[in-house]
Structures are given as C-alpha cells and as structure tokens.
Amino acid sequence: MKKTVFTCYMLLLLILGHQGYSQNYSFSLFGQKLPEALPTYSPDSVDKKSATVYVFMDKTTEYIFDEKGEGVNQYFVTHSLKYMNDDKAVEDNNKIYVSTNSSQELLYIQTRVVVNGKLAYSANEKDFIEVEEDGKKYNMIALKSVSKGCLIETLIGYKLDAELYGEDVFQNSYPVREGRFTLITPEQLKFNTRVYNANGSFANTDSLHQARRFSYMQFKNIPAVDGEEKYSLGNANKLRVEYVYHQHMVSGKKYLKWPEMGRILFERMNRDFDKNGKDLDKILASIKIKQYKTTAEKVFAIENYIKTNISSEPQAPETEGFAQVMKLKYTYPFKINQLYTQLFRKAGIACELVLTCEKPYKRFDPTFDSWTYLKNLLFYFPEINQFMDPDATLSRLGTINTDFLGQQALFVKSVLIGETLSASASVRTIPANKGEQTKDYERYSASLNADLSSLQIQYEREMNGYAEQGFKGLCYALPEDKKKEIMEGFVKGLATDAKLKNLELLNTDISVYENNSKPLVIKAQLDAPHYVESAGESKVIVKIGELIGQQMEMYQATPRTNPVDIPFAHNYDRTIVLTIPEGYVFKGLDKLNINHTFTNSAGAPSFGFTSRYTLENNKLTIYCTEYYNDLVYPVEQFNNYKTVINDAADFNKIAVLIEKK
C-alpha cells in the first residue's frame, strides 16, 4: 500500500521499542456500549437559540501494544448526545453518515432516539447500509422517530491505521455544552497535548491507572462556529486538541523533532537517485534542459514539462522507476513530488523542500513538532527566491496556492557531510506577497452618446501577480468557446446586455516562460445601455459606480470573534473617464469624494479606499484606489476593515445626474 510522504508508520517499531513488559493487549476503551440508563436533558433559554445542541461530545483515543509488543494499535471512539430544538434540527439530523476508508476499520455503531424520556428507536452497525455520494462511500441509516424535543445518542468505534499523532476538533455549526477529550496510552509512552482556540478555562488532568496513562480535558459551553463571518479561516479557528508521541519513558528515546522529520522526507524524496539516473537523463533530454541558461528558465522548463505531461491520480499504481511514469502519463502525488525533487537535483538546481499545511486547515505551530502540520509540499529555490507549487497545475513558478502565503513551514535543504548527502531543516515563514506587486489597474474611458441612450466604453485592465485571480490558467486550459464565454461575462460585469467587440487577451499562455512575469491584459470595447437611465426630458442618470463591477458588502450582526484573513495582499488602481455631449453638465459629484485609510501596528499603510475627481469642461475623471497590504487584520481593526470594504460597495452604487445646461 502506498504511503504519503508525511506518514511515519515505518517508525513504530524503531521508536516504541517494546521493553518486555507484561501488557494487557485487549481493546479497553470504555463506552463500547451505550449506557443502560436513557439520557435526559432540559434545554435552557440559550439552547433554544440554536436548532441543534450537543449536550456532550466525547472523543477518546487509545494506543495499545500489539500482541507481539513490537508495535501499537490505535482505537478511536466518539460518543455524542444531541438535542433537537426545532424542525430544522429534525431535517438536519434524521440520517447518520459514517465515512468508510482504507485507513480505518469500523468496529461498531450504536444509536438511539429518546422521546419524552422513552426509547423510541435504536439501531446498530447491522442496520446501516452502504451508500455512495459524490464518489465517496458511507455507512448510512435513516433514523426513525426523530422529532422536535428528542435526543439522539450515538456511539461509534474504530480501529485506525496507527499514527503517533492526531487531532480532535470540538467545534462545529452547533453549540456544544460539554466537550470531553481522552487520550489513553501504555505507561511507557508519553504523549504531549496542546489545546488551540479555547476561549476560556478548561479542565485538564493527567493520571496513571493500571499501567496506562490518561490525559483528560473537559470544555464547557463551546460556541457554534459563526458561519456568517466572512474572511475567516474556518477550521483553523475551531477549538481543537493536538496530541503527539513524545518519549518512551523506559528507553528514554524521544520522538521526532522538526529536523528529523525533515531528514526523513529528504531521504524518501531522494531514494534510488543513482538507480534512477538514466530515466532522469532521458527526461531532461526531452525537456532540452541544456538550452536554458538561467536557474529560473530551467525550473520553469521542468515544471511546465511535468505539469503538461503527467497528471496526478491518488489511486495510480505503484511504479519502480520514472520511465513507467512517463509511459503511463500519470502517477500518485508522492511519485510526482519525488520526480520533481530528483530532476532538480540531476539538473544541478539547488532547491529546498517546504512542508506545511493550508492556513484554513490550521496555522502552523513551530513549537509543536507534529506530522499533522506537514500536509503539503512546495519547492523553494534560494538562488532566485521563488516558490513552486507542484499541485497547482494551472500556475507556474512564483505563483503558489494563496493558502500558503504567510504560513510558517518546515524548510529542508541538502547538506554534504563528508561524502554523504544529508539534510538540515528549520521552520521559517513563507513570505506574504506584496500588495504593490499584486495590483489591478482598471481603466474605463466612456462616452455618453448623443441621444443619451448608452455608454461607449473603452475597457483596459492589467492584472498583476495574484490579482489575475487564476484567469490565466483558465484561459490556458479551456477550449476557445468556453474561454470566450467566461471572459466576455467578466468584462461585461453588471452590463449583461452590453454589445462587446474587439475583445483582446494578452499573456494568457502559461506554458510560455516570458508570460510568467507579465500581467494578464484585457482590452475590449463595449456599447452598454445598462449604465444609463432616463431621468426626464434631457436628463439621464449614469450609474458610473457600476463600471467597476459588483462589490461585496460586509455586514455582521454579531460581534466579530476571529481576525480577518484574506487570501493575498492586493491593490486596485482605477481610473474612470466619462465624456458627455456638449451642452450638458454633471450634477451630484460630491459623493465621489471618499477617503478612508488605516495603518498597521508598524505605522505602514495597511488598508484603505480613496476616491476623488476632476472636472474639465464636459470630461469627468475619477481616480479610485483600494488596497489591502496585510494578510491578517486583528479583531480590533474589524470595524475599520468593514468600512473600507463597504466603501467599495457604496462607490458601486454611485450615480451622477447629467442634464442640459
């Protein structure tokens, strides 16, 4: 069975090193059966504000030495009790889905519905049926007797593929009255735990009992996740408990730290490098690597060749060397990353392996050494100070998934110790992009025609860096008719009835090296009656603010609880020129003056929106800037941030009156 680069099953025997202790190897997690006594619960006024309430949510993990004492087995049990407060709760909870995958073995499921203190329905794993939805398989049961005011109690037990680390999340879309975390291990095995996003105190006890270690935590009144919070990182902000194996208390052997994890990755990525030499030489010859002079050109050529010729398929078959991969034209993700690593090495390109995770999943914690943070791989090239994202098939060197910007990561670089190639690793930050380098220049030159019925618009847009929003990749990948449909819709914006002519797209071919550093340029001409409305005889209203496209409004009834996290820093530089026929004048221009700017803790410009205008005879020119130079804005800045976001939305609504002199 294939393993990802981030698993460490092969370390179990080495690290645990059974010391000959007498052990009880039976599965011992308490709660394998639902309690005989039926649960009861009386909701209070706070509960009634939510459709569903978790009365309790228990999550328990236990590690037990296998029968030979050479490795460990891992078990997980979740036990929950939910109260149904209204009809929406009934609709949301009348079915139970339990995912099935190769990394876990379902041991048992027990569930029951209690109505008015009496058992109304019960079921176990034998009553579940296997279903498939969206390509994923589940065990599912449709519960009976679910009604307003009932309780649903569920107990599920699994045997997992053993991993010496993990996490349990205790926060979701429903409030949790009591969350309980338990970790049970043999007394020789010491684990570390850490709690994230616990807004308040919680109970935390560690104890030894019958040759086992117990780590227990209890959380009270966990609020539901506010799904209305825009620009929030989701899972990263939820209450969770992380755990990781730390030390064998008899042998003294400690678990891996970041440097050891980095070396393991490096060794796996470079495995059989000498053996693969001929395959690598053939691939580099196909790429014609010798014709490229600079490091950037070489990296781009290798990346473009692999992304063009090899697709990633998680279920692809195992392959020994790379020749078979090139023949099949697809392989599993680890093999692709290994191929990149060895091609760069063979081509003499210095690169560092960068291990991290996406920010919405969790914020990388450099002080808690755990494989749970090492989910994704990037490549960093120190000579040119650029990153490459092997999973981003529709982007090239210098552009990575924005979920990695500003995230900390484990950087692994090669070192030569004597004649042996090894690696060193350290935690550093993947730099955030610079707003000035991610600027969207928008130019709208519009003329109101003589009969006051439409605007003739010259549209020009230059989208730099991440500001191009993935349009380059779409234009490269989509067939011509689909590309035209999407880009025409983008250019028309709110003026869906506009007649578009002379649409021109520049620098869209991402397989051309020179386009990699050029902006996406869009040019077009439009005849757009949408922006003009009659206001009486010889009077019209021009919806000039709509020219910049629809803007998001941000309103939040509840207090903000999490910082604002945006995907990437970005700037807009907009110029709108509106020329009207001779003999007409503008009215109501003062509303075009807007000025809200804010600085960060370092005193540097952080975010803002400004708009001003000049008027010269019958030509109105509007200069509008909007910028977000930081990736994260603290809760204390939320109201100011909301002001700037809504400035753009308010500008969007601005219309000016044009009438005869």
Image (spheres, helix red, strand yellow):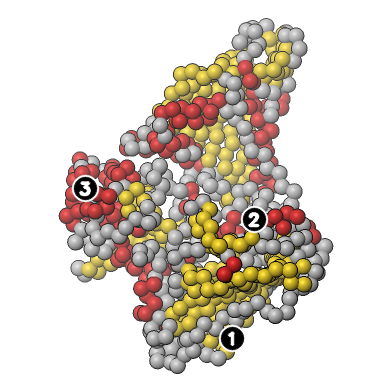
x 47%, y 90%: residue: 23
Label 3: how many Cα within 10 Å (few below 14, some 14–19, many 20+): many
Q: Circle 1 sits on which residue? A: 207
Can you tell which mark lies on residue 562? 2
Q: Of helix, strand and loop, which one carries label 2?
A: loop
Indicate the quadrant containing the N terminus: top left, top right, bottom left or bottom right.
bottom left
Q: Quadrant of residue 251?
A: bottom left
Q: Is residue 482 above or below residue 602?
A: above
x 51%, y 51%: residue: 134
Q: CA distance from mark 1 to mark 3?
A: 58 Å
Furthest-right residue in view?
Answer: 45
Q: CA distance from mark 2 to mark 1?
A: 34 Å
Q: Of helix, strand and loop, which one carries label 3?
A: helix
Amino acid at the residue labelled 3:
Leu
Using residue 441 as the reference point, say whether residue 647 is left or right of it.
right
Q: Circle 3 sits on which residue? A: 284
Using residue 437 as the reference point, say whether residue 201 is left or right of it.
right
Using residue 655 as the reference point, say whether residue 549 is left or right of it.
left
Indicate the quadrant containing the C terminus: top left, top right, bottom left or bottom right.
top right
Amino acid at the residue labelled 2:
Asn
x 79%, y 60%: residue: 48
Amino acid at the residue labelled 1:
Ser
Residue 229 location (% of width, % of height) = 66, 50
Q: Can residue 416 be seen by looking at this rendering?
A: no
Residue 638 location (% of width, % of height) = 67, 49
Q: Nearer the viewer, residue 152 or 51?
A: 152
How many numbered callouts?
A: 3
